[in-house]
Amino acid sequence: MSHNLHNMTDAMYIQHMIPHHQVAVDMSKKILKTTNNDFIIDLAYKIIHNQQLEISQLYHLSKLKNVFESDIL
């Protein structure tokens, strides 16, 4: 089954996911300044940690040559 229904490329996916993840990091940092909810605090720290790692991975992936020759998407 083909996954080319929306003509999205791997490069487009990465280009969109980096800012998407950055918004999650920014929102999490902002909520930490105002919340007293332990669940939200824990979740925000996890989001910051995980999303920053993924931003780094996506950024490095975007710099690799020939990485976008996949037909996955």
Image (cartoon, grey):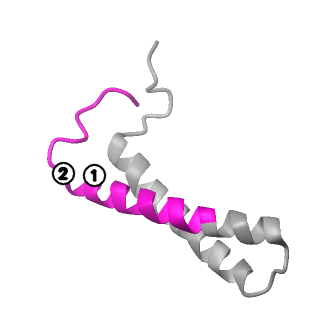
- The three-letter amino acid code for the residue at tag 1 is Leu
Which residue bears the numbered disc 2? 64
Farthest top residue in view: 1
Location of residue 66 with respect to 47 vertically, above or below: above
Q: Nearer the viewer, residue 69 or 21?
A: 21
Is 58 inside the magenta-drawn segment? yes
Please give the name of the residue rendered at 43% of the width and 39% of the height, measured from the top-left corner. 8
Residue 24's quadrant in the figure? bottom right
Q: Decide if residue 49 is in sight here.
A: yes
Q: Position of residue 65 (x, y in %)?
A: 14, 48
Please give the name of the residue rendered at 67% of the width and 68% of the height, measured from the top-left corner. 44
- The three-letter amino acid code for the residue at tag 2 is Leu
Residue 36's quadrant in the figure? bottom right
Over which residues does the magenta segment extend? 46-73
Q: Left of 13 or right of it: where is 38? A: right
Please give the name of the residue rendered at 36% of the width and 55% of the height, measured from the top-left corner. 58
Q: Position of residue 70 (x, y in %)?
A: 28, 31
Q: Are marks 1 and 2 in contact (CB under 8 Å)?
A: yes
C-alpha span from label 1 to label 2? 5 Å
Which residue bears the numbered disc 1? 61
Q: Which mark is residue 34?
A: none
Q: Main secondary structure of the magenta part?
A: helix
Task: Kindly state the secondary structure of the residue where label 1 is placed.
Answer: helix
Q: Left of 11 or right of it: where is 24? A: right
Is 6 inside the magenta-drawn segment? no
